[in-house]
Image: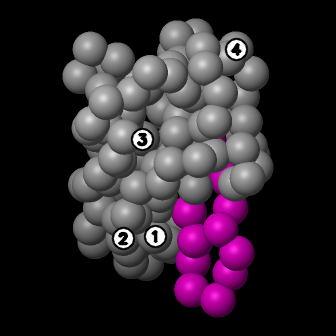
Amino acid sequence: VQLQASGGGLVQAGGSLRLSCAASGRTFSRPGMGWFRQAPGKEREFVGAITWSGGSTYYVDSVKGRFTISRDNAKNTVYLQMNSLKPEDTAVYYCAADRYNSSWLIRTHTYEYGTWGQGTQLTVSS
């Protein structure tokens, strides 16, 4: 399976943007999906994740109440809706599929994800 992230761009502080992550290719698993981000000179950090069923989501504290993850399994697509954007949200955003099948657990560590998209740049201007 391959993941393609899209939707990044330049937005002013306080604005909104929605990222998409489309999966293609054959898959026999039902993975949870996560979003991570990496700012220049920093390590890749967990942003949020959603279980296969979409019944559970979890977010890092810095984006709680501002970011929302959803998924449409019929379209093999996961979304990251970002509102009230701040300059510190500037980063390359990556989507990833975890290594587990139909798990109800949320995964927050990079090593728990086996397939990664190529990343999409978000720049928030002040």
- The residue at the point 74 percent across, 21 percent down is 105
- The residue at the point 57 percent across, 28 percent down is 32
Q: Quadrant of residue 50?
A: top right
The reply to whether dot 1 and dot 2 touch (C-beta < 8 Å) is yes
Query: What is the secondary structure assignment of the residue under circle 4?
Result: loop
Give the quadrant of the C terminus: bottom left
- The residue at the point 70 percent across, 54 percent down is 110
Which amino acid is tagged 1? Val
Residue 84 higher or lower than 79, as above or below: below
Residue 17 seen in the current view? no
Q: Where does label 4 land, which residue? A: 104
Query: What is the secondary structure assignment of the residue under circle 2?
Result: strand
Q: Give the Cα distance between marks 3 and 4.
A: 19 Å
Q: Give the Cα distance between marks 2 and 4.
A: 30 Å
Mark before the other along the chain sequence, 3 or 4: 3
Mark before the other along the chain sequence, 1 or 2: 1
The reply to whether dot 1 and dot 4 touch (C-beta < 8 Å) is no
Position of residue 114 measured from the top left corner of the image (x, y, whole percent): 59, 47
Query: What is the secondary structure assignment of the residue under circle 1?
Result: strand
Position of residue 101 measured from the top left corner of the image (x, y, whole percent): 61, 20
Does 71 lie within the magenta span?
A: no
Dot label at residue 80? 3
Q: Residues within 10 Å of mark 3 (few under 14, many from 20)?
A: many
Q: Quadrant of residue 98?
A: top right
For this rendering, which residue is in front, 115 or 80? 115
The reply to whether dot 3 and dot 1 touch (C-beta < 8 Å) is no
The magenta span reads 37-50
Residue 10 higher or lower than 50, as above or below: below
Q: Where does label 2 land, which residue? A: 121
Q: Where does label 1 land, which residue? A: 92
Q: For this view, does 43 lie left or right of residue 120?
A: right
